[in-house]
Image (cartoon, rainbow, N blue to C red):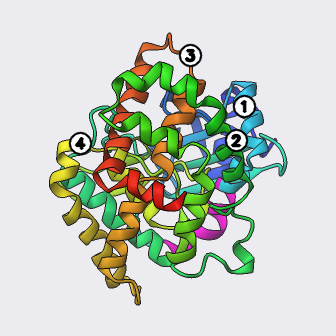
């Protein structure tokens, strides 16, 4: 029996029974998350057990199976960037140290250096997925920043240790590549999205292009390092109703660097601008308080706030430019999403003196 199915058709009752160590009579698979995950095809698999075969500790009524993307270009990008291996290693080696905020993982396998992988995880489709365009409510944002701080605290000031060097640095070659790309695509981004930006927005993007590595290096030299998700946005979060439960998915892009990267990326891009402005001080305070509660010392709220303000010059701007500067502008839904993200992220950077911060760096 192949340990790694090549497609959902090879996820059979026999294969899944072997994985879950249960007697399974039949399964039914339904693809979910289309348009959300670019690097993986995701399926909900419902299970019918044979006899008493569903009474074991790992006998859920359904699971989620993640396989590599059906699109060859996405598969090759995932291999080149090491994203598939990073997610498998995260779940196998690092996730057991995290007490909350992650799905239960039943099975993982990968052939190193290839796109051949599989992840079988807890089915969380009963939780709420919020669209990026709609954005989070305050209560959802509050729950999300608390979970984020709990995850960051596990590796706070430890991410430079030799055993974690397999995780890409947020000032490493990947950032150097993006830095060069931003200058190349800036005119295309301006032509497609400049009209959606507030006053001063395109000026900021133009100054940002070509300075991404310098910005990341500046923050990395003064702010504590941890393991960052690097795509901590609302469509990678699942929310429970009225419980404060948050589950974080899609750990393919992890990096080593300042945790405020994730915090600014979340609040800058996954909240309505007016809601973010009204509550961001409270939300950053909640993030910092949870760090302290989790044992982090020698990181004041004053430093956390200044780091957070500076971090609005990081991933949100880069993601908006790369996506907007390389996308098919005939895709109306994608255009509207990128326009919303670009406006939100650049407004947050402007709100926190982004132009003057960039001038000081230059």
Closest to the observer, 362 or 148: 362
How many neighbours does mark 3 have within 10 angstroms: few (below 14), some (14-19), or many (20 or more)? few
Tell me which numbered mark, 1 or 2, is placed earlier along the sequence. Answer: 1
Q: Residue furthest top?
A: 330
Closest to the observer, 296 or 351: 351
Disc on res. 328? 3
Q: Residue visible at 45% across and 46% down?
A: 316
Tell me which numbered mark, 2 or 4, is placed earlier along the sequence. Answer: 2
Q: Are marks 4 and 3 in contact (CB under 8 Å)?
A: no
Query: The residue tagged with tag 4: helix, strand or loop?
Result: helix
Q: Are marks 2 and 3 in contact (CB under 8 Å)?
A: no
Query: The residue tagged with tag 3: helix, strand or loop?
Result: loop
User: What is the magenta range?
Assistant: 87-98
Q: In the visual, does 249 lie left or right of 158? A: left
Report how many numbered discs are placed on residues in the image. 4
Tell me which numbered mark, 4 or 1, is placed earlier along the sequence. Answer: 1
* Residue on which the image places disc 4: 273
Residue 321 part of the magenta-drawn span: no
* Residue on which the image places disc 1: 10
Quadrant assignment for the N terminus: top right
Task: Indicate which label's residue lies in the foreground, 2 or 4.
Answer: 4
Asked which quadrant contains residue 352, the reply is bottom left
Task: Indicate which label's residue lies in the foreground, 3 or 1.
Answer: 3
CA distance for labels 2 and 4: 47 Å
Asked which quadrant contains residue 144, the reply is bottom left
Q: Residue visible at 32% across and 52% down?
A: 267
């Amino acid at each position: 029996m192949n340990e790694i199915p090549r497609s959902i058709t090879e996820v059979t009752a026999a294969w899944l029974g072997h994985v879950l160590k249960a007697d399974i009579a039949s399964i039914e698979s339904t693809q979910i998350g289309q348009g959300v995950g670019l690097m993986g095809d995701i399926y909900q698999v419902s299970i019918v057990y044979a006899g008493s075969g569903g009474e074991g500790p790992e006998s859920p009524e359904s699971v989620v199976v993640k396989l590599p993307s059906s699109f060859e270009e996405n598969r090759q990008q995932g291999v080149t960037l090491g994203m598939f291996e990073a997610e498998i290693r995260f779940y196998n080696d690092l996730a057991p140290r995290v007490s909350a905020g992650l799905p239960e993982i039943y099975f993982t396998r990968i052939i190193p250096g290839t796109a051949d992988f599989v992840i079988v995880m807890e089915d969380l489709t009963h939780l709420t997925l919020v669209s990026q365009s709609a954005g989070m409510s305050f209560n959802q944002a509050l729950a999300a920043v608390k979970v984020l701080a709990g995850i960051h605290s596990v590796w706070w000031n430890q991410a430079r240790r030799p055993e974690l060097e397999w995780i890409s640095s947020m000032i490493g070659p990947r950032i150097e590549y993006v830095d060069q790309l931003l200058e190349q695509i800036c005119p295309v981004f301006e032509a497609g999205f400049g009209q959606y930006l507030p006053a001063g927005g395109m000026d900021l993007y133009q100054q940002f292009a070509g300075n991404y590595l310098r910005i990341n290096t500046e923050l990395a030299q003064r702010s504590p390092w941890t393991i960052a998700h690097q795509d901590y946005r609302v469509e990678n979060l699942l929310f429970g109703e009225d419980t404060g439960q948050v589950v974080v998915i899609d750990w393919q892009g992890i990096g080593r660097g300042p945790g405020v990267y994730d915090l600014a990326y979340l609040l800058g891009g996954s909240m309505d601008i007016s809601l973010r402005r009204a509550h961001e001080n409270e939300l950053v305070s909640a993030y910092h308080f949870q760090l302290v509660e989790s044992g982090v010392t020698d990181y004041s709220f004053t430093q956390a706030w200044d780091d957070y303000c500076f971090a609005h010059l990081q991933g949100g701007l880069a993601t908006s430019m790369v996506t907007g500067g390389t996308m098919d502008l005939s895709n109306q839904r994608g255009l509207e999403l990128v326009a919303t993200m670009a406006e939100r992220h650049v407004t947050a950077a402007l709100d926190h003196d982004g132009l003057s911060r960039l001038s000081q760096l230059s």
